[in-house]
Every structure is written in C-alpha cells, then in structure tokens.
Amino acid sequence: MKTILENFRLEGNVGEVLPLGSGLINDTYRVMTDEGPNYVLQRINHAIFKDVELLQNNIEAVTSHIRAKLEAAGEQDVRRKVLKFIPLKSEDKTWWFDGTSYWRVSELIEDSMTIETVNPEYSYYAGRAFGNFQSMLADIPAQLGETIPDFHNMELRARQLKEAMAADAAGRASMEEVQAIYAKMQEYMDEMCKAEQMHRDGILPKRVCHCDTKVSNMLFDKSGEVLCVIDLDTVMPSFIFSDYGDFLRTAANKVAEDCPEIDKVEFDIEIFKAFTKGYLESASSFLTPVEKENLPYAVALFPFMQAVRFFADYVNGDTYYKIAYPEHNLVRTRNQMALFHSVMAHKAEMEAFIATL
Ligand code: GN1
Ligand code: MG
C-alpha cells in the first residue's frame, strides 16, 4: 500500500496503514503520517463501480461545490465539513489504477467519529444535515452521471430478483423459506414501485442525492453535531426518498440491519420524528407537496428495497455484498422485511406527525 500511496501528492511521510470502517463494498484504510495530515486510502470496488472516472468526476464536482458554498458562508472549519481528495503527483486526477485495482486518497477528518446507532437528538441533527446536503446541491451546475445506473429504481430491483430466482445460480431458489419470502415480497411489489410511476407521470423529479445515507456514512463530532457526509460514491440524481428513507432504514431500526433476532427488529417512531423535523427544517425550501406527502412511503420503501437486494444476492450466491457467514444475506433479508412490516404498521402515525410540521 505504501507503493500505491507514493503516487499521490501527500504531505509528510507515511507511517502506519490500518483498516478503517464497516463498509460493505470498498476496502478502506487509515494512513498515518509524521508531519502532514493523516489520510484515508480506499480501494474502489471496480466490479460494482464500473466507471471510476465518472465516479470521481461526480465526487469532485460535489465536494468542490459544497466547499465553495461553505467558504462563501464564512464557515471556519471547512476542512472538517467536506471531504478533500488528493490528486496524483503525475496529473490532476484523483484516482490511481495499479493495473488491477483503482485507489483514491482523501484527507482524514480529525476528531470525528462514525456511529452505528443514534438517539433522537443526533437523529434531528442528521435530518438537518441531509436536508442541507441536498439543498446545497440543488443548484450544482455540473450534470452528474449515474455511478450505478438505476441504483434506487425499485422496478429494476424487482426485475433483478425475478431473474435471480429464474437463474437459481446457487441452488437456493427452491428452498421453502426462499419461496415464502419471494411470495411475500410480490404482495407489495406494485405499491413499492410507485415512485417510478410518479416519475413517468411527471410529478416526481430527480435531484442530486447521496443515495447511501446509512448512519455509518456520516461523521459526527464529539458533541453529536454532524460534520459531514462521507461515502460519496453513489451521489447521483435520484428521488429525494433515497436519502430520507435510507437514513431511517438504518437509524430507526432498534437493531443492526443484520441482527438475526428478528423479534427485536422494530421501527423507532421517536427517531423518525426527530429526523423528519430536522429534515423538513432544511429541505422544505425545495420540496414539492408530492415529495412531502410521500415521505412515509419512502420510509417503507427503503427497508423493502434493501430486503429485495439482500435477498437477490442470497439467491445469486452472495456475489455483491461482503458476507461473514453463508446465511448472512438471508438473515439481512429477514431483518429488513421485519423492519418493513413494522414501518407499515406506523403509517398513519407518520402521516399525522408530518401534517403537524
Ligand atoms: C452498501 O458501501 P456501503 O457499505 O456504505 C450499499 C448500499 C446499501 C448498504 C447496506 C454501492 O453501502 O446501497 O444500502 O451497503 N452500497 C452500494 O448496508 O451498493
Ligand atoms: Mg459506508
């Protein structure tokens, strides 16, 4: 890794390089230096992100747009409020191809932490931060590409699952439980695909979104305030439901997304209320009535979509998500379906709360 790091314009001499974070896609390392700032080195999962140039162009457009906004607003701590990617020594681009893998380096944001669970206060800050993130990007001049085309398109995810079941690459499709889960999912499929229909009808726009707003993709400072949003690979045009719904999928589940004790999975309405309040405070300047009305749908959509994705990966023989044991994706599927049902049971309560804001 030190040889790889030599290609980047780093300050100071590289010392220790240690694994960092809990991502399911890329490999991430913390790079310590003697005099310069510390860094984060990442191997980009090229099997998933096929166009690394487009990906890094998106990220640079987004981070420089946000940096300019923060500077214009007189922000003092810009270095900790937006990621900064390091160019190569040989040219200005921010990624290195070593013949096999793609690598990139950003500055490590000091005195920050990621968390896996939030209390209502953190949830409120997070809501404000994601609303802010979206509103800062509302006027980005660059046309961003889709780093994974149709990433949060539920119709596509439904099709992929259907194809996985038909191909049955891992010999799992005929298992009794797999059949039962598949049948259950079909009951909700049309309802969950309604965003795509609203988009075709011209009543639901796409905006620049983060598209992977799980709790662990945010940096908090010691007092619980959000510093910035990380893991920007999936920043692309999508429905605002993506960021709103995916945060609650992780933050408002009383247990982790892969907790095998399904009876402990429960949608936490207090986390929902705090997040929604924060989000609407910073996002209401640009949200349309259709977007706002459908926030409860978004809360249900994301556990459902995630269940479909984990489940398709299980049926395919675990080719996408990192797993720690053979049933991991099935356990994740059960967990996300349980969360989905818990969310659905709170639909009226969510609607009533949003109406008060
Ligand atoms: C992946 O990269 P990571 O681990 O933050 C995935 C998300 C899923 C999430 C589930 C590019 O996110 O879409 O919601 O796992 N990212 C990609 O934990 O597929
Ligand atoms: Mg991540």
Image: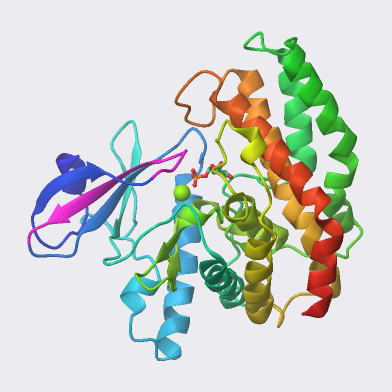
Is 284 or 26 nearer to us in this picture? 284
Does the magenta segment cover residue 254? no
* Residue 328 in picture, x, y percent from top left: 54, 26
Residue at the image point whose x is 66% and y is 31% from the top: 333
Residue 30 is left or right of residue 286, and the answer is left
Q: Is residue 101 above or below residue 152?
A: above
Residue at the image point whose x is 75% and y is 22% from the top: 163
Residue 31 visible in this rendered orientation of the protein: yes
Residue 294 visible in this rendered orientation of the protein: no
Is 192 or 90 nearer to us in this picture? 192
Which range of residues does the magenta coloring cover?
22-34
* Residue 68 in picture, x, y percent from top left: 44, 81
* Residue 214 in picture, x, y percent from top left: 54, 53
* Residue 116 in picture, x, y percent from top left: 47, 52
Q: Quadrant of residue 198?
A: bottom right
Is 270 or 245 nearer to us in this picture? 270
Q: Quadrant of residue 140?
A: bottom right
Q: Quadrant of residue 193?
A: top right
Residue 304 is left or right of residue 126, and the answer is right
Residue 355 is left or right of residue 259, and the answer is right
* Quarter placement of the N terminus: top left
Residue at the image point whose x is 8% and y is 64% from the top: 35
Q: Is residue 17 above or below residue 92?
A: above
Residue at the image point whose x is 41% and y is 40% from the top: 26
